Image (cartoon, helix red, strand yellow):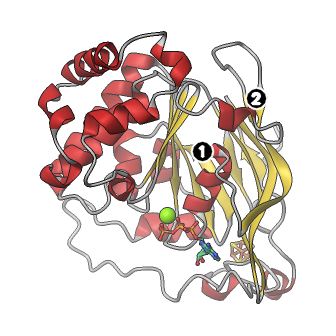
Amino acid sequence: MLKIDHLSASYKTIDGNIHVVKDVNFEIYDNEVFGIAGESGCGKSTLLKTLYDIVEFPLEIDKGKVILSGTKNGKPFSYESGQIRKSWWNNISYVPQAAQSVLNPIVRLKDQFLDSIPDEDKKNETPEQTIKRVAKYLEELGLSPDVLDAFPFQLSGGMRQRAIIALATFMSPNVVLADEPTTALDVVVQRGILMMLMRLQQQFKNTLVIVSHDMGVHYQITNRMGIMYSGSFVELGKTEDIFEDPIHPYTKMLIGALPRVGDKSQKVGIPGRPPALKNPPPGCRFAPRCPMATDKCRQDPAPEFREIKPGRYAACHYLEPEVN
Ligand SMILES: Nc1ncnc2c1ncn2[C@@H]1O[C@H](COP(=O)(O)OP(=O)(O)OP(=O)(O)O)[C@@H](O)[C@H]1O
Ligand code: SF4
Ligand SMILES: [Mg+2]
């Protein structure tokens, strides 16, 4: 399980701190596909970087904790101790946004696999033996082991993305973080990548965290999801519940703007733009775009992210926890 405990992080710039992750507080369970959605610039990639502990200047964690439990040695790991970083590949792995650019175009894939697999996992094997294991794994995933002899520039975008996912899952980590894994690929290839991710998750029974601005991706493969707006989660719950009965005004607008089969009405996006994170509005950050906003919303920051009904969390002045 990944526990994210009141986490805040900001980019330190010469013009001041940009608070990109603001008091994010939630849990991701074992053996689930968890989705993180939200408009461009709301902080999805930054949040994922904090979960993977790639917190490098100018990004800093200001407060809060990330704890990874259910690790292979049975002990919980926290980012503060550097343990999450030490367990990269083995317990937690990451497919970054625009992952294709992380492959060196002029180094054969097999050499990139050999460089990425930690020495302790090579168990005194020769490089040929390690590559044999990788080739077998690729075959299990339905990929031709011939790609190992190829240079990344010789492969299609979809094949490169498949190779990166194979690399990230080779050591069967408990948690796989994937940032926009289908963006910039054509629709047919996107479907293939989603199916590959789903098959792997079902095979390893691990946790897949998938970041996407595309609500269709979440609808297709996530079990639960969180909606981010301007650095914070505004709603979290089971994906089917969020699609059927969104409760936060932002989620309602997001879902209402989605095209539906058989519905010929003109869909309009959410009017306006998210606030600049450098200088957000003083009250609820969604107030300038929220049709339900009141003076209270414009003055008082949104309340803490809280459980409104079992398993369903939101942060809005007008959503009170239901009393049983
Ligand atoms: N190195 C940096 N220095 C300063 N600000 C940054 C830096 N990297 C990102 N930001 C800012 O942080 C905010 C959130 O960025 P982030 O990449 O996390 O958003 P995102 O939700 O992943 O967006 P997208 O959907 O476009 O990938 C943006 O406003 C961005 O301008
Ligand atoms: S707190 Fe107010 S402005 Fe913010 S989402 Fe709720 S109703 Fe809208
Ligand atoms: Mg991003």
Secondary element at image label 1: strand
- Vertical position of residue 53 compared to residue 286: above or below: above
Quadrant location of the N terminus in the rendered image: top right
Mark 1 sits on what residue?
237
Mark 2 sits on what residue?
77
289 left or right of 40 in image: right
**For the residue carrying disc 1, how many other residues have a C-alpha within 10 Å: few (<14), some (14-19), or many (20+)?**
many
The answer to whether the beta carbon of the residue marked 2 is less than 8 Å from any atom of ligand 1 is: no
Pick whichever of labels 2 and 1 is earlier in the sequence: 2
Task: Report the Cα–Cα distance between label 2 and label 1.
Answer: 25 Å
Q: Residue at x 62, y 49 (%)?
A: 236
Q: Position of residue 76 (x, y in %)?
A: 77, 24
Q: Residue at x 19, y 61 (%)?
A: 262
Total tally of numbered discs in the picture? 2
Task: Look at the numbered discs 2 and 1 and tell me whether their residues touch, using CB distance below 8 Å.
Answer: no
Q: Residue at x 21, y 33 (%)?
A: 148
136 left or right of 116 in image: left
Tell which quarter ligand 1 is in: bottom right
| Disc 1 residue type (three-letter) | Gly
User: Which residue in the rendered view is the most extreme toward the top?
Assistant: 124
Q: Residue at x 38, y 60 (%)?
A: 98
| Disc 2 residue type (three-letter) | Phe
Quadrant location of the C terminus in the rendered image: top right
Q: Position of residue 296 (x, y in %)?
A: 84, 82
